[in-house]
Image: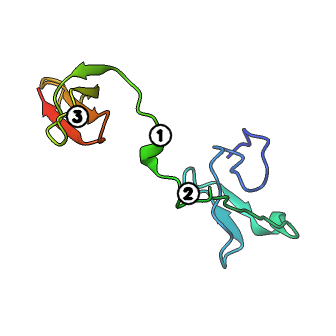
Amino acid sequence: MSKIFETELEFCEVCGSVLPLPGETMFIECKRCQNKINVKEFHGIENHSSHIFKSYDASTNDKEEELSGPTVERKCSNCGYEEMIFKAQQTRSADEGQTIFYTCKECRHQEIEYS
């Protein structure tokens, strides 16, 4: 196969896909286009990766985040508050109505209405 991409060795030079790690054979085969690269080309190359996770602060509660979005006069079935935030999404097939999700601004109780 002809070389299309100028890439680092961890990417296929034909299709650009990430290459699998070398195994026990003399070639690494791209899973997407079956291009084969000689393992000797990887001699002396180290590959490092790391994952950085956000720290979780247990004292921070998601409920402290301010709710935003369009509001509607609708009584919350949980606390009786008269105003709810809503969003509409198409969750079923296109010929059926949309689904409306309501969230109480006071207690954050959620309700769903299938229209």
Name the residue located 22 percent from the left edge and 32 percent from the top edge. Answer: 81
Q: Mark 2 points at which residue?
A: 31
Image coordinates of residue 90 in percent, x first then y, are 24, 28
Q: Which of the 4 image quadrants contains residue 74?
A: top left
Closer to us: 29 or 58 = 58
For the view shown, which residue lies furthest in the bottom direction? Answer: 24
Q: Name the residue under label 3.
A: 91
Q: In this picture, is 79 found above or below 23?
A: above
Q: In the drawing, does residue 106 fall left or right of residue 52?
A: left
Q: In the drawing, does residue 6 fall left or right of residue 28?
A: right
Q: In the drawing, does residue 86 fall left or right of residue 113?
A: right
Image coordinates of residue 96 in percent, x first then y, are 12, 26
Image coordinates of residue 27 in percent, x first then y, are 69, 67
Type of the residue with mark 1: Glu
Q: Which of the 4 image quadrants contains residue 111?
A: top left
Name the residue located 78 percent from the left edge and 45 percent from the top edge. Answer: 7
Q: Mark 1 points at which residue?
A: 65
Image coordinates of residue 107 in percent, x first then y, are 29, 42
Secondary structure under badge 2? loop
Name the residue located 57 percent from the left edge and 50 percent from the top edge. Answer: 33
